[in-house]
Image (spheres, rainbow, N blue to C red):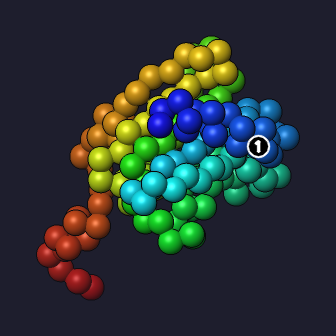
Amino acid sequence: MRKKLIELAKEAREYAYAPYSNFKVGAAVLTSNGKTFTGANIENSSYGATVCAERVAVFNAVSAGEKEIVELAVVADTKELSMPCGICRQVLVEFSKDLKIYVANLDGKFIEKTLEDLLPMAFTRENLKGVKRNI
Ligand code: THU
């Protein structure tokens, strides 16, 4: 599945809309039901409105009713591998339990990590239950 997801992420990268950074990223996710979804980064002239490839892929999955991501591949055209940003890591925590992450470039270089590696001690819905005082 690693190879397939990296291939899907490469294909999705072609659809990146990145006229400002010229930094194209593709992502592909596998859900617990065995379905795959892809995404590419979508930039905006109001830079803060940009959405990363990883989140586009996750939101594609979730908006199709898939709420658990089990594997993710991310591809960018960099010599050193380009890791998922912090906001995407937090979004991934919301929709995964034990997520495998493959980060690859176009030359065939890749690493495999877990989301726990990338975002240990994450804030989750469990923390919301721990509130001591409500205003
Ligand atoms: N980008 C992603 O798509 N994923 C990441 O994990 C890091 C950054 C995009 C956002 C923006 O369009 C461009 O890369 C440069 O930051």
The answer to whether 40 appears left or right of 64 in the picture is right
The answer to whether 125 appears left or right of 130 in the picture is right
Quarter of the C terminus within the rendering: bottom left
Crowdedness near tag 1: few (<14), some (14–19) or many (≥20) residues, C-alpha within 10 Å:
many
Along the line of sight, the residue nearer the viewer: 16 or 73? 73
Above or below 47: residue 83: above
Can the viewer see residue 87?
Answer: no
- Residue at coordinates 60% horizontally, 61% vertically from top-left? 60
- Residue at coordinates 39% horizontally, 49% vertically from top-left? 70
Above or below 31: residue 107: above
- Residue at coordinates 57% horizontally, 45% vertically from top-left? 28
Residue 16 image position (x, y, % from top left):
76, 43
- Residue at coordinates 67% horizontally, 21% vertically from top-left? 106
State the image quarter where residue 75 is shown.
top right
Q: Residue furthest bottom?
A: 135
Give SS at disc 1.
loop
Residue 64 image position (x, y, % from top left):
57, 69
The answer to whether 47 appears left or right of 5 in the picture is right
Establish whether ligand 1 lies closer than 8 Å to the Cβ of label 1: yes
**Count of numbered badges drawn on the protein:** 1
The answer to whether 77 appears left or right of 57 in the picture is right
Along the line of sight, the residue nearer the viewer: 115 or 124? 115
Mark 1: amino acid: Ala
Q: What residue does disc 1 label?
A: 16
Can the viewer see residue 40?
Answer: yes
Residue 123 image position (x, y, % from top left):
30, 56
Above or below 33: residue 43: above
Residue 62 image position (x, y, % from top left):
52, 66
State the image quarter where residue 24 is shown.
top right
